[in-house]
Amino acid sequence: MFEFSQEVISVFSERSDGNMSLNHGDVSMSLENRNNFLGKFKINPAYLVCAKQVHSSNIVCVRETDRGKGAFNYETAIEATDALVTDQPQMALAVFTADCLPIFLYDQERSVIGLVHAGWRSTCEHIVKNTVKMMQDNFFINPKRLQVYFGPAIRSCCYEVEEKMNRYFSYGLQKRDGTYYLDIIEVNKAQLFDAGIIKYNIIDSGICTSCQNHRFFSFRKEGKSCGRMISVIMLR
Ligand SMILES: [Zn+2]
């Protein structure tokens, strides 16, 4: 948990909270895990808004009628989307990750929030930059005042990639002992600066899911059957 302001609640779960996904890993306890975790922060699980994440750059501006989508059943989740934005209170935007980067966005002036699921493909397609643009176009936020938080993700210490990734990224790749590593935080930061976000408004948890695999799920470390953490942001 971290605090942007009293108006907004922003949290992410850990391994000890259990799998939060309804379509990855062992899902038998997921609804109960969500209940327990969200209950700690007085978030009603029925207010969750979840998407079927597909590593796209699709962004949805969430409306009143979207509340509860994907909350209890994967099939009802918003189709093919990797970023959510809203100005509605009691709308618990959620993304699910195990290595991918959750990016929390908050504009205090207009009371607008956003949540991005940034894997390398979505990052490559500028999802965070486009999300900021959507917040500007729909809610007239000023990027200079937008606050950003990077949650737990696999970092350049551990994120080994193939050399051909340099086709997709002109920066953010590191070469150590003949092996390439992607710094997905650096790439997303650069996109945010490009969108007008101020450096001191970006806070990074600094958590590497692979280094701290005992505390967090890591797709790279555990493979396909691993569970997912939930990241949630909600206007009170
Ligand atoms: Zn690491």
Image (cartoon, rainbow, N blue to C red):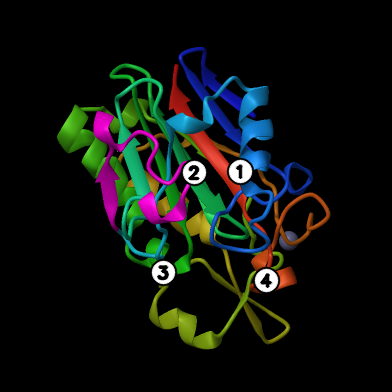
Q: Quadrant of the C terminus?
A: top left
Does the numbered disc 3 mark a residue whose Cβ is under 8 Å from ligand 1? no
Q: Quadrant of the N terminus?
A: top right
Find disc 3 in the rendering and name its residue: 121
Mark 2 vs 1: CB contact within 8 A: yes
Towards the viewer: 28 or 80: 28
Q: Which residues are magenta?
A: 58-76
Structural crowding at the residue carrying mark 1, measured as other residues with C-alpha within 10 Å and reported as few (<14), some (14–19) or many (≥20): some
Amino acid found under the numbered disc labelled 3: Arg
Q: Is residue 107 above or below residue 213?
A: above
Mark 4 vs 2, N-terminal side: 2
Structural crowding at the residue carrying mark 2, measured as other residues with C-alpha within 10 Å and reported as few (<14), some (14–19) or many (≥20): some
Residue shown at 47% from the left, 41% from the top? 71
Question: Where on the picture, by quarter, is residue 157?
Answer: bottom right
Q: What whole-number distance in Å separates the C-alpha atoms at marks 3 and 1? A: 29 Å
Asked if the magenta segment contains residue 69, the reply would be: yes
Spot occupied by residue 224 in the image (x, y as percentages of width and height): 64, 73
Find disc 4 in the rendering and name its residue: 220
Find disc 1 in the rendering and name its residue: 31
Does the numbered disc 1 mark a residue whose Cβ is under 8 Å from ligand 1? no
